[in-house]
Amino acid sequence: MDKKTKEKKTRAFHKKICNILTNNYEEHIRVLDFGGRDGCHYEEFKGRLNNHHLEWNIVEIPSICKKHKHKKHLSYYESIEEAPQVDVVYSKSSLHYSLDYKKTLTQLASLKPHFMFFHVVPVGDHDTVLVQQTNKWAKTYGGYGAQQNMQFWFMNETEFTSHMQELGYEKKFKTFHYNHPCFKPLEHPLNGKPDSNSFIFKRL
């Protein structure tokens, strides 16, 4: 899938999120952006929700927190445990880098968000598999460091949604994003290119 098509799908998913937020919150929205990098997601949502005050909290690795903590409109935390309670959780292409993705979901749920939005996660109809990925392209993403080895989860969708259900969240929406590329040197035992999908969950 080409870059323009991916961007179009992202815009459509973000538009759906903004419609939900507009219909459920009048002025103030507390957001936790898990893996929010340099605040780029804040800038996009702020442009769409200009009648709302966004309290934007980001959980990131220490190097990114240190690099961007001077930004007054953003609050950075090195762990979910440090973050405040929020109205919504947003995460784009980050959950699968967790050491233990189920533990991460449990920690996110402990913040009592009404909605959880997961954009571009490798969740599909295959076994849950943990692999090793070498991020040769990592400098693009704000300071991870080239050649850094990172673990990467491919997650079974039934397992993923069942855990969310156990945490008190119901799947309200799913959309296909693209077939996840099998980077070199990303190696895994899955046949073909596993799906990356986007999900919306609402607290029961």
Image (cartoon, rainbow, N blue to C red):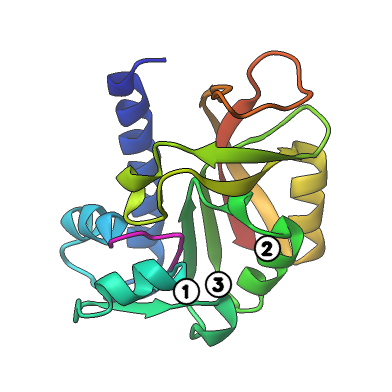
User: Which three-letter amino acid code belongs to the residue tagged 1?
Assistant: Asp
Q: Residues within 10 Å of mark 1 (few under 14, many from 20)?
A: some
The answer to whether the residue labelled 3 contacts the one labelled 1, judged by CB atoms less than 8 Å apart, is yes
Q: Residue 171 at what x, y percent from top left?
A: 66, 48
Q: Is residue 57 visible?
A: no
State which quadrant residue 174 falls in: top right
Quadrant for the N terminus, please: top left
The residue tagged 2 is: 105
Q: Residues within 10 Å of mark 3 (few under 14, many from 20)?
A: many
Image mark for residue 87: 1
Which of the marked residues, 1 or 2, is nearer the chain's N terminus? Answer: 1
Badge 3 element = loop
Range shown magenta: 33-38
Image mark for residue 113: 3
Q: Residue 5 at what x, y percent from top left?
A: 33, 20
Badge 2 element = helix
Q: Is residue 149 left or right of residue 22?
A: right
Q: Residues within 10 Å of mark 2 (few under 14, many from 20)?
A: some
User: Which three-letter amino acid code belongs to the residue tagged 3?
Assistant: Pro
Tell me how far mark 3 sits from mark 1, CA to CA: 4 Å
Does the magenta portion include 71?
A: no
Badge 1 element = loop
In this view of the protein, which residue sits in the foreground, 156 or 192? 192
Q: Main secondary structure of the magenta part?
A: loop
Q: Nearer the viewer, mark 1 or mark 2?
A: 2
Residue sitting at x 51%, y 53%:
117
Tell me how far mark 2 sits from mark 3, CA to CA: 12 Å
State which quadrant residue 79 falls in: bottom right
Seen as rendered, the residue at the extreme front is: 147
Q: Nearer the viewer, mark 2 or mark 3?
A: 2
Which of the marked residues, 3 or 1, is nearer the chain's N terminus? Answer: 1
